[in-house]
Image (tube, rainbow, N blue to C red):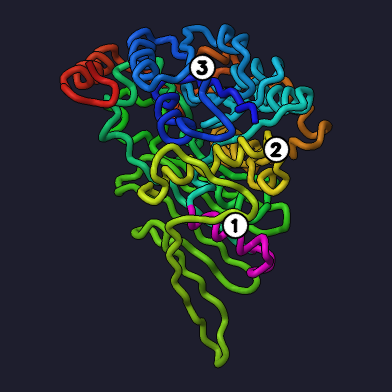
Amino acid sequence: MKKIKIGILGGTRGLDSLYRVFLHHPYAEVSAICDNFAPVREKICEEVKNLGTQTHVFADFNDMLESGIDAVLIANYANQHAPYAIKALRKGVHVFSESIPTQTMKEAVELCEAVEESGTFYAYGENYCYLPHMLAIRRMFDRGEFGDVMHMESNFINDCSLKWHLLTRGDAAHWRNHVPSTFYCTHSIGPMMFSTGRRAIMTVGMETNRMPYLAELGARSASAAMEIMQLDNGGMAKSCNGNYRRSFSAEYRFITESGTVETNPYTLGKIHISRPHAGGSYKTLEEIHKAYTFDHVEIFTAKDIEQMRAFELADVYQLNIFIQSILGNTDAQPYMIDIYRALDMSTVGTLAYHSILNGSNAVRIPNMRIKEERDAYRFDNRSTDPSLSQGEDLLPSNKGGFVPIDDDVYARVKKAFFDVPITTGGH
């Protein structure tokens, strides 16, 4: 069988995916990697030469699209996925988008319609949906073991302030310095929607203050956010995400008509299932899920899968689902997060921020499957990104308004980056 030729935009993730999934994959190979940063390209060239692969290295995305690739993994800056995905789709190239699909509702409409017109596959790589224990919960809902969901809640806590200098390198224009508090919401919202098949029809957004421990690093946004949702079945959901002062946490709770299933915040992979029990009490079971077995979907990886951590497994699972969906495996396709499910997850954050700036009033969420509903947002280009939105469309990065930041703040952060002798992106 001729292998699917994969191109990857973003050299760091490109090499990671090459080693983890594609190096000896029977159905796919990385034939191209694109990065516009010369030192990264030099590293890629060195690595692929040592591996003996036929991987071409590009500085320009358009050149990579013309190189004969069948599919592209978009892994550039998290706020810049939509324009590259649209360009690839219009070339008839399948798209796997690794991070937030869009920044604005206008982008959401354009991306949705580009997918529909292309006839190709679009997959969103929300890898938290593919953690083994979350896939186990998805299977429970698919089998009807819990009935309808009444209430869901989740949080994604990742205090990036401790490594802000490594992430932003003192760049005032870096996306992390200006995206709103609700931007990175799909690690919390995504698994709730993926597991249950539900979508939100309305949201109310709230955010914390812009806390000093991030403000002093040049971040303009509030430090954390909450999205409260009304679901399409009448149920409720709540998501919290941001830079809370706590060790890393990604946890989920599903309360249904016949019991509750929830993850353990301190033991990754452990879930607790609580059901009504005879005698007026509840019985709770504990399960550990360190791996997952799909029905009729092969999982291939270049590394020893038995030694992989949960998040590595999630990346392997989702990329294999994408590959086998392209190959026509109808058992794989329901597990793929298509454009509609992707926007079900991400537009909650976009519109929750509109809610925050409007005094936390409720905002309806369009069903992007329905043209008439998305038409209302066709020209809505509001965002906090000055490279994308201008004039009245440019929004402040927090509810307090536009924040002036002295240049010496970013100079200090940049110095902290270069003062670290060994980092994932240092000198």
Distance Cα–Cα, label 2 vs label 1: 18 Å
Residue 359 in sight in this render: no
Q: Nearer the viewer, residue 269 or 57?
A: 57
Q: Who is closer to the viewer here, 404 or 421?
A: 421
In the picture, the disc for residue 32 is 3
Q: Amino acid at mark 3?
A: Ala
**Residue type marked 1:** Arg
The residue wearing badge 1 is 138
Residue 222 position within the rendered picture, expressed as x and y whole percent measured from the top left = 41, 34
Q: Nearer the viewer, residue 319 or 380?
A: 319
The reply to whether callout 3 and callout 1 are in contact (CB within 8 Å) is no
The tag earlier along the polypeptide, 2 or 1, is: 1
Residue 305 is situated, as x and y percent measured from the top left of the image, at 42, 47
Nearest to viewer (mark 2 / mark 1): 1
Decide which of 316, 36 is in the foreground and name it. 316
Q: Reply yes or no: does residue 123 show up in magenta.
A: no
Helix, strand or loop at disc 2?
helix
The secondary element bearing badge 3 is classed as strand
Residue beneath disc 2:
340
Which-is-in-front pick, marks 3 and 1? 3
In-image side of 327 versus 376 (left or right): left
The x and y percentages for residue 112 are 72, 28
